[in-house]
Image: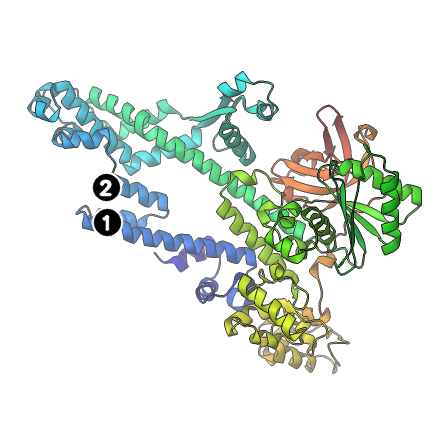
Amino acid sequence: MDIIAKLTQEFSLARWQVENTVTLIDEDNTIPFIARYRKEQTGSMDDQQLRELSERLIYLRNLQDRKAQVIVSLTENGHITDELTASITAAITLQEVEDIYRPYKPKRRTRATMAIEKGLAPLADIIWEQDLAVELAAVATPFIDPEKGVETVEDALQGAMDIIAEKISDDPTCRTLVRNLTYESGIIVSEISKKAKETPEDINASVYEMYFEFSEPIKKIAGHRTLAINRGEKEGFLKAGIQAPEESIISQLSGIFIKRNAFTQPLMETTLADSYKRLTAPAVEREMRNLLTEQAEEGAIRVFAENLRQLIMQPPVKDNVVLAVDPGFRTGCKLAVVDETGKVLETGVVFCTTNKDTGPSKKMLKQMIDRHKVTIIAIGNGTASRETEVVIAELLKETGSKAQYIIVNEAGASVYSASKLGAEEFPEYDVALRSAVSIGRRLQDPLAELVKIDPKSIGVGQYQHDMNQKHLGETLSGVVESCVNAVGVDLNTASPSLLSYVAGISPVVAKNILTYREENGKFTTRAQLLKVAKLGPKAFEQCAGFLRVPGGKNPLDNTGVHPESYKIAEAYLKYTPPVAAKVTKSLKDLSVTPKLDYDTAAKALNVGVPTLKDIIKELEKPGRDPRDELPQVLLRSDVLDMEDLSEGMILTGTVRNVIDFGVFVDIGVHQDGLVHISQIAKRRINHPLDAVQLGDVVQVKVLSVDLKKKRIALSMKDVK
């Protein structure tokens, strides 16, 4: 297999792009480094394209290796033929290879293998040819052997049927036909389980009520419904299965495997039906369920990944002193005041909920706000969030404070606070107070704080606990890595958690950077990285461009310009284009050359155009943060109740979660409202992410309010 040609075709790329990219990957270059600093070699492929190509490269190489293994196995067992070799070589999926190998694969004991042990394989071969001119009984009689357990003609024929049934089921043509027809015309069905019937009042069972009598074509079912059925089955509330077009399948299989022979046809028809129902159908049903689950998981992981990207790329709320509140009933609300740099100034606990006497708590909160000149209050969205929000809103109104509040998604904060990392960072605080600090800091800089938490613990998706955790973890870690490197990291302030996501830096090297910083003081140049233990030239090449040294000796160290391109950047600052008057340029006062001919400039500076454009972009805004260009967060000073909502009301809210069938929007009433996918845009969209992203500030119209079920239906269409 020409893997390069295959990738070239599948990704619609030029062969040189694929060849260069594969070479870069094989040389252990990281995806962020390739995407940012090797654009000439890849044709400016972005990191998502590169990750997909890398994954596909691994699959194709595994496919190639598996083909070689199967051919070796068939050769050793004496089954190899030119036809088999050609079929295996031509296979384009692992499934095809396994289908071809199936008839020759060593098997556990089956009815067919036991029949073979009884010496009935020759009888099966005779019947399989289907050209008899005598009764089957006459053919089967010589195979009667009581010592082998074949006491009658019926025993002999049954054994032969078992062998033929397995042969049909193992045939690649049979498997492919059944698989295709089941996918095209099959239906997935679910019904209420015995457990759910016995406990109809179970609130968990009611979640699956729509699936108590449900059916949908396999090829049309939405991923979130597949995952819901899977979970309902796992929890014992549903019983699900596949209804295949059995009549059509058996009819078409008959046309392939059964010949018109009066003596063998009835037996072959019975055998084929048995083969399908007992062997092929259950196997294909498992394949279909696995396929649907894999497809659903892939879709869910994509949504989760995009939500995570939007969450951690939300703009930091800079230059604000934040009072963070981790709400709670029994143990009170944990407080932490953090300054503009994230340093903890004060902590405390108040019973800041409406079911307590809030007078003393309000007094303490006001004192903290005044003492530290707090400008924003960050309230976690967990238990007692609503009650705390009401008290905070009342306090701001009563005192006339100019401070505003925001509800912060606290998912994962408790995981961080109870972690070893949390204990190392704040050994003097208990778990609850660490959680409050995390809430405040994640508002100030979502990226820097959220990298301390396992991405899987940040609940911005659906059914994340039901999917392949390894694949989910790898995908989400890739998202975090991509975001961290896109923003860049301050070498002198970054935590080991943040540093470990920088291209080329392992967790061990990240800790070594911190150790070097503690022993030698702040970094003044990127070049000092080479003095860090276990950070060699290759790691330096990968990471240097993503690390920033504000106020260092070389202003270029605070840009995204890679050290390998410093000479080019310096040459550009002195470059006088032939079509314009001499322009004085410096890092402190850069004037971009008007109407610059990039091709001419790139040739003069001996650099590729993509790299030159990136260098100029960095020189225009040294130390820039791409997150600053995104919409800012929505701050509040008052609160609403669900009872205050009415149909037709127009509100401003923040998108808190994006899922397959819609988006959940925080409109300030504690209970997020649902905008169904049909209510997101006037135009037809295939997925909510086509129109809206997590963190977006949007205007919505209230369609309905169900106080009993605590459900709010919203629309983003026709909102003026």
> What colouring does the structure picture have?
rainbow
Query: Would you call the spot at circle 1 few (<14 residues within 10 Å), some (14-19), or many (20 or more)?
Result: some
Q: Are marks 1 and 2 in contact (CB under 8 Å)?
A: yes
Report the residue at 49% width, 18% height from top. 194
Nearest to N terminus: mark 1 or mark 2: 1
The residue pinned by badge 1 equals 73
The circle on residue 647 is none
Report the residue at 76% width, 49% height from top. 633
Indicate the quadrant containing the N terminus: top left, top right, bottom left or bottom right.
bottom left
Quarter of the view holding residue 515: bottom right
**Looking at this view, is 97 or 151 the one in front?**
151
Indicate the quadrant containing the C terminus: top left, top right, bottom left or bottom right.
top right
**Looking at this view, is 291 or 576 the one in front?**
291
Query: Would you call the spot at circle 2 few (<14 residues within 10 Å), some (14-19), or many (20 or more)?
Result: some
Residue 214, horizontal then vertical, whole percent = 53, 23
Q: Amino acid at mark 2?
A: Tyr
Taking 677 as reference, is 440 left or right? right
Asked whether the viewer can see residue 293, the reply is yes
What SS does tag 2 mark? helix
Residue 81, horizontal then vertical, whole percent = 19, 48
Q: Residue furthest left?
A: 142
What SS does tag 1 mark? helix
Taking 82 as reference, is 437 left or right? right
The residue pinned by badge 2 equals 104
Q: Amino acid at mark 1?
A: Ser
Q: Looking at the image, is 103 positioned above or below residue 36? A: above
